[in-house]
Structures are given as structure tokens and as C-alpha cells.
């Protein structure tokens, strides 16, 4: 397997010429198109994706170790088959609508100014994660570990406390309706 280090890939269309299977370390991908590409078996370590379209990518056994996504479209991606070893993400200004993080260990993941509409976090571990100014409309939290997670600046979330682990999770008093809406309580 090839190892590429400290490379910058700019304005590449990987739907036409697929990214080579290998290990990418400290690489930067800028304005690249990966739409519906197969990235299975590839390892990304300390990499950065800026303004890329990664919607519908296939990531079976793909490794993401300390990977930053900035201003990316990551719609409809199933992260469940990704490699769990060393899995660590940071998302800023990304659209992750309809993505699936079922049963993933996402401890300390940052979702900063992200759109997370109808994203599935069922059985995920989001301990100490933060959702700064992120829109969670329609997202699913079921049997999700949310200990010390920070929702103080999150928008439009709906979390049923009885179905999730919420010890020491942080919420703004202005958005408490997201914890009570399932009870049919009207809050004004």
C-alpha cells in the first residue's frame, strides 16, 4: 500500500479518476469532488478536506484519524462501516444531512456550524462532543451516549432523555423544548 505524505490535492475530480488506495498522512484536499466515490480501504491521518463534495461516498474499512472537514458537503454518508481504530473527526461549516453514525465512537467530536438534518446518531458515543451553532433538525438520538456533550448553542434538536445517557450534558435554557417536546408540553 502506497503512503503519501504532505501532499495537496486541489480541484481534483475523483469521480473520473479515483483516489488511489493507500495511506494519506498530513494531506490537504481542496475543492475536490468525491461524490459517490468508493474510498474503501483508504487511510487518512491528520488530513484536511476543504470545500469538498464527499456526498454518498462509500467508506468500508476507511480510516479517519484526526481528520478535519471544513466547508464540505457530506450528505448521505454511512459512517458505520468505517474503521473504528483511532477514529477522530472535526467538522466545521459542513452539511452532514442524512448521514449515519450508528454505533460509532465519536468522543470529543466537534460539529461547528454544521447542518445535521435527519442525521442518525443511534447508539453512538458522543461523550464530550460539541454541537456549536449546529442545526440538528430531525436527527435521531436513541441509546446515544451524550455524557458531557455540549448542546448549549445547538439548534432544533429533539432528544428523549429516557432513551439516552445525558449525565452532565450541557443545554441552554432557551432550547430546553428539545428535551421536552416528546411529552407534548407547550413551552413559551
Image: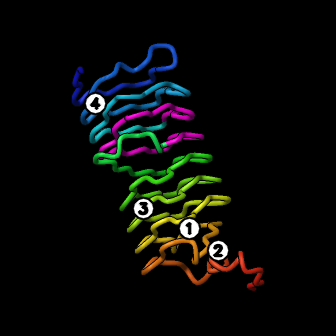
Q: CA distance from mark 1 to mark 4?
A: 33 Å
Which one is earlier in the sequence, the residue at label 2 or at label 1? 1
| Quadrant position of residue 142 | bottom right
Q: CA distance from mark 4 to mark 3?
A: 26 Å
Residue 95 appears in view = no
Write down the residue under mark 2.
178
Which one is earlier in the sequence, the residue at label 2 or at label 3? 3
Q: Nearer the viewer, residue 86 or 132?
A: 86
In the image, the segment drawn in magenta is 52-78
The x, y position of residue 70, in whole percent, is 44, 45
Q: Nearer the viewer, residue 68 or 56?
A: 56
Question: In which quadrant of the rendered image does the N terminus lie?
Answer: top left
Write down the residue under mark 3.
125
Which one is earlier in the sequence, the residue at label 1 or at label 4? 4
Q: Which mark is residue 24?
A: 4
Measured along the vertical axis of the image, is residue 138 above or below residue 57? below
Crowd class of label 2 (few under 14; some 14 to 19; many from 20; radius 10 Å)? some
Q: Nearer the viewer, residue 96 or 48?
A: 96
Amino acid at each position: 500500500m502506497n503512503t503519501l505524505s504532505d501532499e495537496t490535492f486541489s480541484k481534483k475530480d475523483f469521480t473520473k479518476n479515483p483516489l488511489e488506495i493507500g495511506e494519506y498522512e498530513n494531506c490537504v484536499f481542496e475543492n475536490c469532488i468525491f461524490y459517490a466515490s468508493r474510498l474503501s480501504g483508504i487511510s487518512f491521518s491528520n488530513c484536511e478536506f476543504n470545500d469538498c463534495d464527499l456526498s454518498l461516498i462509500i467508506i468500508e474499512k476507511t480510516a479517519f484519524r484526526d481528520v478535519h472537514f471544513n466547508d464540505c458537503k457530506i450528505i448521505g454518508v454511512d459512517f458505520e462501516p468505517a474503521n473504528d481504530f483511532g477514529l477522530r473527526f472535526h467538522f466545521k461549516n459542513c452539511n452532514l444531512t442524512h448521514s449515519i453514525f450508528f454505533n460509532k465512537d465519536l468522543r470529543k467530536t466537534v460539529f461547528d456550524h454544521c447542518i445535521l438534518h435527519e442525521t442518525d446518531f443511534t447508539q453512538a458515543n458522543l461523550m464530550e462532543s460539541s454541537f456549536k451553532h449546529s442545526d440538528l433538525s430531525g436527527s435521531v438520538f436513541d441509546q446515544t451516549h451524550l455524557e458531557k456533550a455540549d448542546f448549549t448553542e445547538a439548534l432544533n434538536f429533539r432528544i428523549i432523555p429516557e432513551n439516552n445517557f445525558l449525565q452532565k450534558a450541557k443545554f441552554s435554557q432557551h432550547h430546553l423544548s428539545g428535551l421536552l417536546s416528546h411529552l407534548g408540553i407547550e413551552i413559551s
